[in-house]
Amino acid sequence: MEQFVIPLNRFDLGLLPEAARDMASPSFREALDEYFSRRFREMGVNGVVQLTGDTLAVGWVAPDFDAVTAAIALCQRGQVRDGVQLLELARSRQPDSPDLLLNLGIGLNELGEGQRAVAVLEHLLDLEPDRVRGLVALGVALGRLGEDDAALDRFTRAVTLAPTDPWTQSNLGGMLLRVGRPAEARPHLEAAVQLAPEDPRGWLLLGESCLESGDEAAARTALGRARAQDPHGVVRDRAEALLNRLASGRFPRNLEGINPEALAAMTWALGHLRSLSPADAWNLTLKAALLGQHGLRLTDPAKAHRLDGIPGPLTALQVACLIHAGLQIAAAGTPSGFPLEQEHQLASATRG
């Protein structure tokens, strides 16, 4: 039997039912046994758990069982917390395993434990300074902690070591974009999408860098690719908001910062939505959002749109106002992607 021993305070109590997290309670031991019994069954091994003072020992009666491989499989199935706990156990026997440290660092970062992730990944890089995935994972962890310069340094080193790895290029480009250097980000993001054209995140970041650099045509193309490749995810939502921003074009405003046509359309949209029940207003907002999912040219009054439940054609501006107003009614402050905040504020104040 292979045994792994860790201090009990390194066991993740979040894996147990809330009522059983008091280590002094009888239910703690029962919950601990039940937790590991489930994991043993999932992994197809026989095992034992032993508590001795402040120490937790877990053993597997399977000489060929690879705890690291099993932990990675758990993480890939979305059981990140379980996988991290298994890696913590395995680390007691393999404290300097590069693969273990890499996956433990990535898992800890996914769980929001950035400081612990940084410590683990720095240990990995002490052992293997040129481990590219370790450099990128450390850069991600540092970036989430707000240490942008340190993250940028790790991403730059990773690209120097592996310029043909799309992961290195997209992370360096994303960090340059984040720190306000879109022109420098663009060539890295272009390299990333050439190396991995199926990655929607790479196209999204490229679109953002082009937009921030003033190249609207390239931004529109990249954002369209991002939206098409992630039709139901968060990348698609962000790409859609940016495409709507592009579709707005040059939105004219008067000296008070108001577009009179938009104010009239917003006043109409608010009046119509407030005449409906909350459920009907939300349904109409969703219909308008579906209608506008491919972009609305707010400054093109000639384009007519039709929406179930509203007689007659609508302008793109009216559809956008329905979306914006409906979102604010449902959850004030929710971004719509349209430059209509001033008109909504004034129309709301006017209507009371």
Image (spheres, helix red, strand yellow):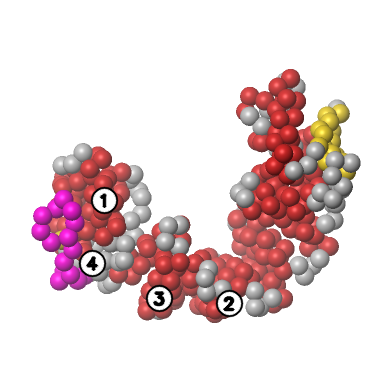
What's the mark number on residue 221?
A: 3
The amino acid sitting under disc 3 is: Thr
Dot 1 or dot 4, earlier in sequence: 1
- Kindly state the secondary structure of the residue where label 4 is placed: loop
Q: Distance between the residues labelled 3 and 1?
A: 27 Å
Mark 1: give few (<14), some (14-19) or many (20+) Cα within 10 Å. Answer: many
Judged by depth in the image, the label closer to the viewer, 1 or 4, is 1
Tell whether position 310 is magenta. Answer: yes
Residue at left offset 21%, top offset 38%: 277
Dot 2 or dot 1, earlier in sequence: 2
Dot 2 or dot 4, earlier in sequence: 2
Q: What residue would you read off at disc 1?
A: 285
Quadrant where the C terminus sits is top left
Q: What residue would you read off at disc 2?
A: 195
For the magenta stretch, what is the residue range? Answer: 299-313
The amino acid sitting under disc 4 is: Leu
Q: How far apart are marks 2 and 1 (CA)?
A: 39 Å
Q: How far apart are marks 1 and 4 (CA)?
A: 17 Å
Q: What residue would you read off at disc 4?
A: 298
Tag 2–tag 3 contact (CB < 8 Å): no
